[in-house]
Amino acid sequence: MRITFMLVGATDKKYLLEGIEDYQKRLIHYLPFEVKIIADIKNAKNLSSDQQKEREGKAILDMVSTGDELVLLDVEGAEFSSPGLANWIEKRMLAGTRQLIFVVGGPYGFSQAIYKRANSKMSLSKLTFPHQLVRLLFIEQLYRAMTIIKGEPYHHD
C-alpha cells in the first residue's frame, strides 16, 4: 500500500518542516510514502471562503484517482487512539488498498465536492490546532502506527 499525505499550502515554519521531513524519512522504511503540496490559491484575499474551498477542492480532485481511498482530516471525523489508528491502517493494508490519501485542507476546510468524494473523515482531536501543526502531529501518528503494526518499541501502552 502507498500512503500520500496531501497538504493545501506549503509549511513555512522551519521547525515544523524539519519534523515533517524527519518522520517522512522514517516512514519510507515501512511503505511507499510521499507528501504532496497543493499550492496556495493565488489572489485568495479577493475570493470568498467558498470560492477558495472550491478551487482547493478542484486541485485536490485533480490529484486523486478513481481507486484511491481519500481520508479527510476533519474536526467532524472519527477519532482514534494510536493503536486504533494502527489497526485501521492495517485493515486497509490487508484489504489490498493500493493508495491511501490523507488530506489536510486549507483554512476554511473542504468543498462539498471533496466531502462527496471522500471515503472517510478522521479527527486528531476535538481541540483546534493550527493547520501547519496538524501536519507534524499527523505524520508522527502515521509513523507511530507503522511501528505498532510492526511490533517495534516506539509506542508504549
Image (cartoon, rainbow, N blue to C red):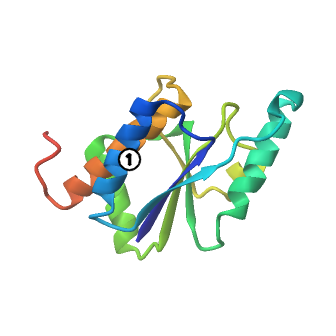
The quadrant where residue 61 appears: bottom right
In the displayed orientation, state which residue is furthest to the top.
127
Q: Disc 1 residue type?
A: Glu
Above or below, comparing residue 117 to residue 115 in the picture: below
Res 30 quadrant in image: bottom left
Q: Position of residue 128 (x, y in %)?
A: 51, 23
Who is closer to the viewer here, 88 or 65? 65
In the displayed image of the protein, which residue is found farthest to the front?
14
SS at mark 1 in the image: helix
Answer above or below: position of 126 versus 41: above
Query: Extreme right residue here?
Result: 46
Look at the image and tell me whether residue 4 can be seen: yes
Tell me if 68 is positioned left or right of 15 in this view.
right
Number of numbered labels in the structure image: 1
> In which quarter of the view is residue 97 placed?
bottom left
Q: Nearer the viewer, residue 85 or 131?
A: 131
Q: Quadrant of the C terminus?
A: top left
Residue situated in front as seen by the camera: 90 or 146 = 146
Position of residue 80 measured from the top left corner of the image (x, y, whole percent): 37, 42
Q: Nearer the viewer, residue 61 or 25?
A: 25
Q: Residue at x 10, y 49 (%)?
A: 153
Quadrant in which the N terminus is drawn:
bottom left
Q: Is residue 87 visible?
A: no
Residue sitting at x 47%, y 23%:
127
Query: Which residue does the numbered mark 1 point to in the structure image?
Result: 21
Spot occupied by residue 34 in the image (x, y as percentages of width and height): 46, 60
Q: Is residue 89 left or right of residue 132?
A: left
Q: Is residue 151 left or right of residue 45?
A: left
x and y percent of residue 84 in the render?
A: 31, 48
Q: How many C-alpha atoms fall within 10 Å of the one at disc 1: few (<14), some, or many (≥20)?
A: some
Give the residue drawn at x 29%, y 43%: 82
